[in-house]
Image (cartoon, helix red, strand yellow):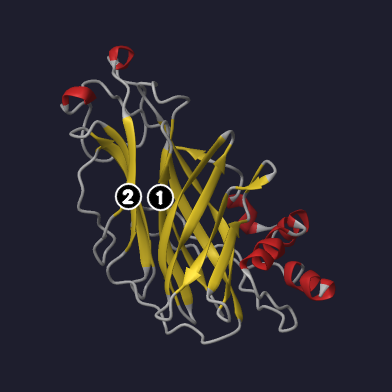
Amino acid sequence: EQSAHNALVGGSSPSGPTGTLDGAGSPRFRGKIVHMPTRIRLGCITCLRQFLTADRSRAATAISGPIMKNLSGLAMICIALALAGCAGGSAGGSSGGSSGGSPDSGAGNAKSSTTASRFVSPTGTGAINLTLDQSQTVHDVDSGGAGYSIMVGLDTAAGALTAVSGVVGASTVAAPPSAGQVIYDGDFQLLHIDRDTSADPSATVHDAQGTMMLIADFDVDQFAAQSRAMSGPSPLLSMEGSIANSGAMSGTVAYVSGTDTITGPLTGEIGSDKAVGAFHGKTDADAMAGGFLLLFQ
């Protein structure tokens, strides 16, 4: 089994970036598709986790090359979410997308804000029908219409720093395998609204993205996954859950950034060709939302 594991993490080097852009203008990279050796049996979710976490340093070395350029930590968007007037429900700052800036001049007198995260239902093009102040939006939709959308910003009516995500309405995948273990590989992205404490009057949005591997065991209808981008001793992103007969995915996700750990629910679809999903989570101070689009070959 060890030799089979070595073959899995130490195969040929992954292909480079595709060079295509999604609708939000961010680059999309595709990782190497790896087949599960038939003699490795992953009969329980504990085994999946052990397999994914074993020899992470060698696994990271095995994917060195162009893809690693996209895994060099968090890309900071540096958007300031001014919270002035939140308690009264009045809007502050400008509406629409914002790619940068400094805290609002009135932020020193701002009231603290709550956090919120939830699932939404994006349209087939990835649009989210929601208005958030000083929002940031990301979506990744492939040529077949499968993908996810993310939005973060300030809900001025609720006085909440808000992160939402969802699988796009047109997402379709092939029927899932009836048995066996399958590896999916591809990209994830998330937006993290970051504050030191819940009393902070402003926040920074971090854009975290990279590649990840998901192992689905259709014998027991479970899956586990983790990102290849490492943050200290823990994966940046990890998830696990169950698979319905229809291919619907449900589970939990954990995102680690420095001293922050944010957990929350996951939803998605998995088939014999790909897996697509969305997730969100929050703490008293922070909120995050993200998604993934992974391929099987």
The reply, left or right, for residue 37 in relation to residue 279 is right
Q: Residue at image x 43%, y 37%?
A: 283
Q: From the image, which quarter does the N terminus lie in? A: bottom right
Q: Nearer the viewer, residue 258 or 26?
A: 258
Residue 120: image quadrant is: bottom left
Crowding around mark 2 (Cα neighbors within 10 Å: few <14, some 14 to 19, many 20+) is some
**Residue beneath disc 1:** 280
Q: Residue at image x 45%, y 24%?
A: 197
Disc 2 to disc 1: CB gap under 8 Å = yes
The reply, left or right, for residue 32 in relation to residue 271 is right
Q: Residue at image x 57%, y 77%?
A: 220
Residue 14, given in percent of the width and then of the height, sits at: 65, 67
Residue 235, given in percent of the width and then of the height, sits at: 63, 50
Residue 279: image quadrant is: bottom left
Above or below, 219 relative to 286: below
Q: In what element is the residue under mark 1?
A: strand
> At label 2, which amino acid type do we have?
Arg
> At label 1, which amino acid type do we have?
His
The reply, left or right, for residue 271 in relation to residue 135 is right
Residue 92, given in percent of the width and then of the height, sits at: 21, 26
Q: From the image, which quarter does the C terminus lie in? A: bottom right
**Residue beneath disc 2:** 118
Crowding around mark 1 (Cα neighbors within 10 Å: few <14, some 14 to 19, many 20+) is many
> Is residue 227 at all visible to an observer of this figure?
yes
Q: In what element is the residue under mark 2?
A: strand
The reply, left or right, for residue 60 in relation to residue 100 is right
